Image (cartoon, rainbow, N blue to C red):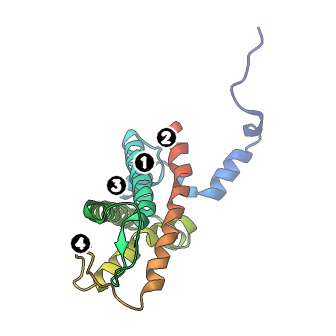
């Protein structure tokens, strides 16, 4: 009886180990400290059951916040000079609903980012990663824009004035749509 090997041919020459080492040396050794275990939990959905649960929650928050971000542009706003209204969603209750969803998602994204940067083995590698930059842009403009509004962090209203001169910060929010690229990272780990 011939024995069938379960090892893939491309894995027998050691090239997969060299690739893994070049990608991240941090994931080759088992984590020993609470900091390493926390980082692995936040970064690798295949690490544990808790990591998978966190990944599913983050994927859900990414999806919900992205859909709300898109639909937020369809909330009815009327010209102060009596012109036509734009948008198909009534201002009440949708503007406040999207604002609450935004608050919840920004708090989750901020906490996740802080935990990941606080536990990462190399802050330089973390800060120079493109996806981590997208994560930062997912929540930082919210705190800047809302902090500069008058009054700060207030709920939306039709007569609320926004801070002038910060249109570029609002435009940066469009980069948040790139958070959907994280689906690849989370879904690969969840399938394992």
Q: Quick one: SS at disc 4?
A: loop
Counting residues from the start of the chain, the first of labels 1 and 2 encountered is: 1
Counting residues from the start of the chain, the first of labels 3 and 2 encountered is: 3
Instruction: Report the quarter where the N terminus lies.
Output: top right
Quick one: label 4, few (<14), some, or many (20+) residues within 10 Å? few
Q: CA distance from mark 4 to mark 1?
A: 30 Å
Quick one: label 2, few (<14), some, or many (20+) residues within 10 Å? some
Residue 140 image point, x, y percent: 39, 75
Tag shown at residue 89: none
Q: Nearer the viewer, mark 4 or mark 1?
A: 4
Quick one: label 1, few (<14), some, or many (20+) residues within 10 Å? many
Q: CA distance from mark 4 to mark 2?
A: 36 Å
Counting residues from the start of the chain, the first of labels 4 and 3 encountered is: 3
Asked whether disc 4 touches disc 2, contact meaning CB atoms under 8 Å apart, the reply is no
Q: CA distance from mark 3 to mark 1?
A: 19 Å
Q: Nearer the viewer, mark 3 or mark 1?
A: 1
Residue at the top extreme?
A: 1
- Residue that mark 4 sits on: 155
- For the point 34% across and 88% down, the residue is 163
Q: CA distance from mark 1 to mark 2?
A: 8 Å
Asked whether disc 3 touches disc 2, contact meaning CB atoms under 8 Å apart, the reply is no
- For the point 26% across and 80% down, the residue is 159
Asked whether disc 1 touches disc 2, contact meaning CB atoms under 8 Å apart, the reply is yes
Number of marks in picture: 4
- Residue that mark 1 sits on: 55
Q: Quick one: SS at disc 3?
A: helix
Tag shown at residue 190: 2
Quick one: label 3, few (<14), some, or many (20+) residues within 10 Å? few
Q: Quick one: SS at disc 1?
A: helix
- Residue that mark 3 sits on: 34
Residue at the bottom extreme?
A: 165
């Amino acid at each position: 009886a011939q024995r069938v090997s379960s090892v893939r041919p491309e894995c027998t020459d050691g090239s997969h180990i060299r690739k893994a080492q070049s990608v991240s040396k941090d994931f080759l050794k088992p984590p020993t400290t609470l900091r390493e275990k926390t980082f692995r939990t936040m970064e690798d959905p295949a690490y544990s059951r808790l990591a998978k649960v966190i990944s599913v929650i983050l994927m859900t928050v990414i999806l919900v916040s992205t859909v709300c971000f898109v639909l937020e542009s369809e909330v009815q706003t009327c010209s102060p000079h009596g012109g036509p209204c734009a948008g198909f969603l009534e201002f009440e209750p949708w503007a406040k609903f999207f604002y609450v969803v935004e608050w919840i998602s920004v708090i989750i994204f901020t906490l996740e980012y802080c935990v990941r940067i606080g536990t990462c083995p190399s802050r330089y590698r973390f800060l120079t990663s493109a996806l981590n930059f997208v994560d930062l842009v997912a929540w930082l403009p919210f705190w800047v824009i809302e902090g500069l509004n008058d009054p700060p962090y207030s709920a939306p209203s039709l007569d609320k004035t926004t801070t002038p001169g910060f249109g570029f910060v609002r435009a940066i929010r469009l980069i948040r749509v790139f958070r959907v690229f994280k689906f690849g990272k989370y879904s690969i780990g969840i399938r394992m």
